[in-house]
Amino acid sequence: MEMKDFILKCPTKKHWEKIGIIPHHGILMPLFSLHSQKNSGIGEFYDLLPIIPWLKSLGMDLLQLLPLNDTAYDPSPYNAISSLALNHVYLSLHALPYLEKNIELQEGLKEFAPLNLEKRVNYTQVYDLKLKWLKHYFLLTFNLFENDPSYQKFISNSSWLEEYALFKAIKADQNEAPFLSWPQNLQDISDANYKNLLKRYSADLNFYYFLQYLCHMQLKKVSEFAKENHLFLIGDLSFLVSLDSVDVWKHPQMFDKNLIAGAPKDALNQSGQKWNFPAFNLEEMKKSNYFWWKNKVQNLALYFDIYRIDHVVGLFRLWVMTKDEEPLMGRYNPQNPLLWESTGKTLLMAMIKSSSILPIAEDLGIIPPVTYKVLHELGICGIKILRWQKDEKGFFPFNSYDPLSVTSLSTPDLEPLALWWQNFPNEAKKFSEFKHWAYSPTLSFAKRKDILSDSHHTSSIFHLNLLQEYLALFDNLISDNLQDERINVPGTVLPTNWSYKFRPSVEEIISHKELSKNIKEILRYR
């Protein structure tokens, strides 16, 4: 059976019909990594507006982003304090309504100028300064928004918004302390006490409603502009949520706060990983008909056409440990391997049925065969990292990849191609032999371009690479130190994690004629 016929018999049939069962090409870029002439120290929603037609001009139709959820003071996009709320740090302040009428607000934007000049994102400073500016903006303009029909529609249709706003208001009142350290009456979310808390903090809720409305309107505009340009936006479904989140505070029965999620040891992390995320209470999630998962997918569907499920293997079995245990002492939940297939398939089916946007899955790491089996049955693409597609005899031919897949050169958690090539010479030499090349520690322009072309001409349906993989064609578009081009090192707490900025600005990227010319050649070369 041909792949197209197979997909059209899968549970994701209707999702695929919206996207098209044809080769798709695109770029992954963390929003925080962009910078432009008008932004405020970090990439912002409207920085994507010029990127969209640029991608279309190259012959691409995909733009993938990392999670955009509110993470408070943590720069990691995967440590969300809400699985639904957007992060106000991405607001394009210069484009907010009524700004042109207030000189004081315009002058306040000048405070961000030094942050724009920094080589890395100073997330904490940006977060604080934006919050301060937005509070001032709220005081001066909220009366112009509160009776607007679109504002009223947003707050009435967002069932999650009230508990999020209350959580944020209490957290601010408690000097951002983790909610598990709050006084007991603030941790009590019984119906009666919840109503009391709403009354107590009623004066503070509108500010957080307001921020979410502004975020929604800006991201919705980006989404609509992408549709006008026939470009598909790919969102990212964070698999887990912070222990200090509104989700755990308001819905504690859905989580097991005594168990911490992580990952067993693998080739990249011999000690395993311990994350600051609570494990799920699978029985309670089942009793609720998986509403937590469905809500997350439905919220993504407001803005995106496709979504990537982070750490999809965790839907089948999650590596867990107590707070006092090291990762190597952990265990799988469920522990019985016979339960893994049904657990994962049930969760995935609940997500598939909850919306019309197409899921793809991050299936890297130690993956049991049942995960691949279920993903294939459901018509969900996994990830193929070009450098890892090999057996004991050598690399697989590019036309032998399962079409139901996404080919990439790297991910935000991996070294970009050139750094891998330099740091893992034995692996790079084997790839050179496969390509019939003589190995050199430094990738030449021609070889880099050829590998990029390889990644776009595998038999996978999707082809996605980090933007810096293309920028690296030109030395002046990346850092002199290749290590600085890495976005994150898993299992570590480093100041360089999640603070990466592209060296060129948005304006420089889209106007770089040689970059555009070579990307077009990469897509059509073969």
Image (cartoon, grey):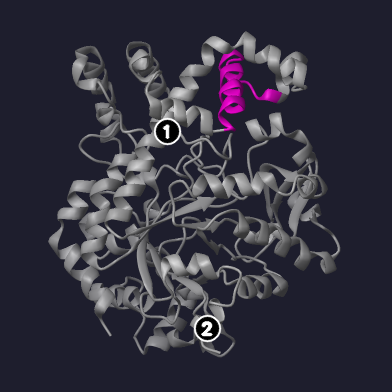
Q: Which residues are magenta?
A: 159-179
Q: Which residue is mark 1?
A: 123
- Indicate the position of residue 183 as horizontal and vertical percent values: 74, 14
Mark 1 or mark 2: whose residue is earlier in sequence? 2
Q: In percent of the image, x 57 and y 72: which residue is there?
A: 379
Tell us which disc is closer to us: 1 or 2. 2
List the single residue furthest toward the front.
149
* Location of residue 171 by image quarter: top right
State the quadrant of the C terminus: bottom left
Q: Is residue 474 above or below residue 510?
A: below
Residue at left offset 55%, top offset 39%: 84
Main secondary structure found in the magenta portion: helix
Up/down of 74 relative to 433, above or below:
above
Instruction: Give the spatial CA distance, label 1 vs label 2.
Output: 47 Å
Give the class, few, some or many, for how many residues have Cα within 10 Å of label 2's Cα (few <14, many ≥20). few
Q: Is residue 90 visible?
A: no
Q: Which residue is painted at 73% across and 55% down in the image?
A: 318
Label 2 residue SS: helix
Tell me: 55 left or right of 339: left
Residue 134: percent from the left, percent from the top? Answer: 37, 20
Q: Amino acid at mark 1?
A: Tyr
Label number found at residue 5: 2
User: Would you say 124 lies left or right of 333 here?
Assistant: left
Q: Amino acid at mark 2?
A: Asp
| Callout 1: SS | helix
